[in-house]
Image (cartoon, rainbow, N blue to C red):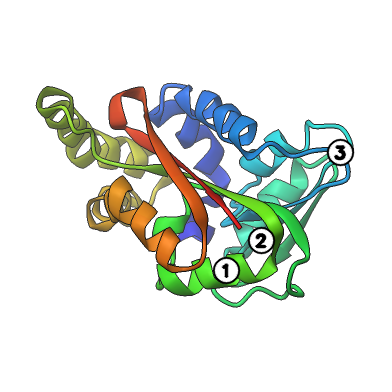
Amino acid sequence: MFDTVAPRYDFLNRLLSVGIDGRWRRRAIAALGPEPGHVVLDLCAGTGDLGFTAARVDGVSVLGMDLARNMLARGEAKRGERRVRFVQADGECLPLPAASVDRACVGFGIRNMSSLSAAFDETVRVLKPGGRLVILEFTIPPNPVLRSLYHTYFHHILPRVGAWVSGDGEAYRYLPASVSRFPEPRDLAALLTTRGFRDVRWSLLSGGIASLHIAER
């Protein structure tokens, strides 16, 4: 599914989020706090936008991993001279040694994992002690009025626009369905704690349209 929508993926992200997604990514990388010399793992990297944001920090190298080959190919096409390398890999079985990365981040992809526990176990394994994970993900706004508007947009407008632009209606019906099934921020924080992370905290972005989780290894 993601391979199919790859050619229009970036355009639709900007269109359907009204450009807010860029601001969310910058905030996520600020929370991640990569430093010169760090290796950052960008899980569910897609076309690389979150990793590219991390690579703006001087001396930071980014390893972007995703299962969708066409998404990674789009990222490679726009990589330029940035210190980002893309590898096709399963986030639940990472081809990396233990304690090999300084930071890890996931932008709008963790809900696509078949097992969150397995993904978090692997992230704990490859992070160095003292490392940090940041998760940026869609959620459902707690405010009843905003939630009603959100549901109308997410379930009726977004699938139609996504299908029209991408030619794949199923992919943009999957998006709201996957968000509805995903754990609420408090529950996701609790799961992170049970999988070996500490100092887990989270905040809502843009009235609760998205959430930002920060966890320490």
Describe the element under mark 1 as helix, strand or loop.
loop
* Residue displayed at 69% across by 47% down: 75
In the rendered structure, which amino acid carries the disc numbered 2?
Met
Q: With 135 as the anchor, is 33 left or right in this view?
A: right
**Which of the pair 167/71 is nearer the observer?**
71
Reading the chain from its start, which is encountered first: label 2 or label 3? Answer: 3
Q: Is 115 drawn above or below residue 213 in the view shown?
A: below
Q: Are marks 3 and 1 in contact (CB under 8 Å)?
A: no
Describe the element under mark 2 as helix, strand or loop.
strand
Q: Are marks 2 and 1 in contact (CB under 8 Å)?
A: yes
In the rendered structure, which amino acid carries the disc numbered 3?
Pro
Q: Position of residue 83 (x, y in %)?
A: 85, 44
Which residue is label 2 attached to? Answer: 65
In the rendered structure, which amino acid carries the disc numbered 1?
Gly
Reading the chain from its start, which is encountered first: label 3 or label 1? Answer: 3
Q: With 91 as the anchor, is 2 left or right in this view?
A: left
Residue 91, numbered label: 1
The residues bearing labels 2 and 1 have C-alpha atoms spaced at a distance of 7 Å
